[in-house]
Amino acid sequence: MRIFEKNKSAGILIFTLALCMMALLLSAQNSLADNSGDRDFFALGNEAYVNKDYDQAIVHYRAALESEGYSPSLLYNLGNAYYMKREIGQAILNYERALYLDPGNADIEANLALARKNFGLETPDQAAWKTFFNPLNLNGWTWLAVIALFTFSLTVLINGVRPGLLKRPAPKLLVCLCLLAFMAAGTGVAAQYGNLSRGVITAENARLRVSPFDSATDSGVVKNGKMVNLTDTYKGYVFVKTANGKSGWLPKKAVSKVLPTEENHQPQSSPTPSEIGKINGSSGESELKNT
């Protein structure tokens, strides 16, 4: 009887494990199918782009963004498609978002500069000292600060357990490097914090108003694709300031934040830079490689 009970228990255990394995396999297959679908959106967008069907390319790229979140390559290719349609505001917006997720990317910087040049937009001025902090975005500098502070605290804690540790050259150097990294990261966070309020004009002939009402007097026009700083909101309006000193209220639909707060803009897995298209400066055409 005991042998039968043991065999019965073992059979139940094996059956349960088999069910768990089947569930895991099905989950993995579904996950792979979902990821394959996301890659198909990108591939379909590339195919439409090569065929110069830029409207359809935008549809596919945006579908990929909706399904897998923001990534540098998707935003970059989306910017290329908008550029080819001469929708400069959307092109600049997506280039800026791509550059935020992948700071220092030469292809993105080149297309962004070329788009501004071809459409008569000036490159936003930046203080020389701030360029040092461009290699990392706000998240990058924040993580560096956290890692530096954690390493410093851990070293000090270990020194409390084993007194005299910080008298040694290597731990002492580590502590100094952590302090320097933490201070640099703090400055980087402060320098990059201004990106949270940056926006791009995405409407033609966006008219500034002296107050946030439809009946308010116009105070000027802001060019499509121009960078602005968003400082305040009121109902359906946002107060913006331009680099040349202009300021006023614009309808929210006329401007888009570079870093949206209500959308998913986390980096996701994406194709390598070699699979990203480039704009040819002489002809204005793009060559986009299929993935």
Image (tube, rainbow, N blue to C red):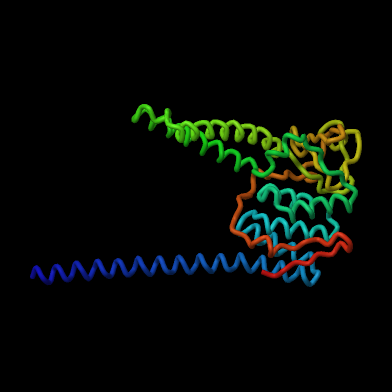
Which of the image's four quarters has the N terminus? bottom left
Looking at this view, is 75 or 222 the one in front? 75
Which of the image's four quarters has the C terminus? bottom right
Q: Residue at x 84, y 33 (%)?
A: 248
Looking at this view, is 172 or 79 the one in front? 172
Residue 178 x %, y %: 52, 34
Residue 84 x %, y %: 83, 61
Up the image or down, 27 lies above or below 188; here it is below
How many tags in the picture? 0
Residue 138 in sight from this viewpoint: yes
Up the image or down, 125 lies above or below 287; here it is above
Residue 170 x %, y %: 46, 35
Looking at this view, is 252 or 186 the one in front? 186
Tell me where residue 230 sits by quadrant. Answer: top right
Q: Residue at x 38, y 27 (%)?
A: 164
Q: Residue at x 80, y 35 (%)?
A: 240
Tell me where residue 24 sits by quadrant. Answer: bottom left
Q: Indicate left or right for 6 with 24 as reference.
A: left
Residue 92 x %, y %: 79, 50
Looking at this view, is 82 or 236 the one in front? 82
* Residue at the left extreme of this rendering: 1
Up the image or down, 53 lies above or below 182; here it is below
Q: Residue at x 61, y 64 (%)?
A: 38
Residue 234 in sight from this viewpoint: no
Tell me where residue 192 sits by quadrant. Answer: top right
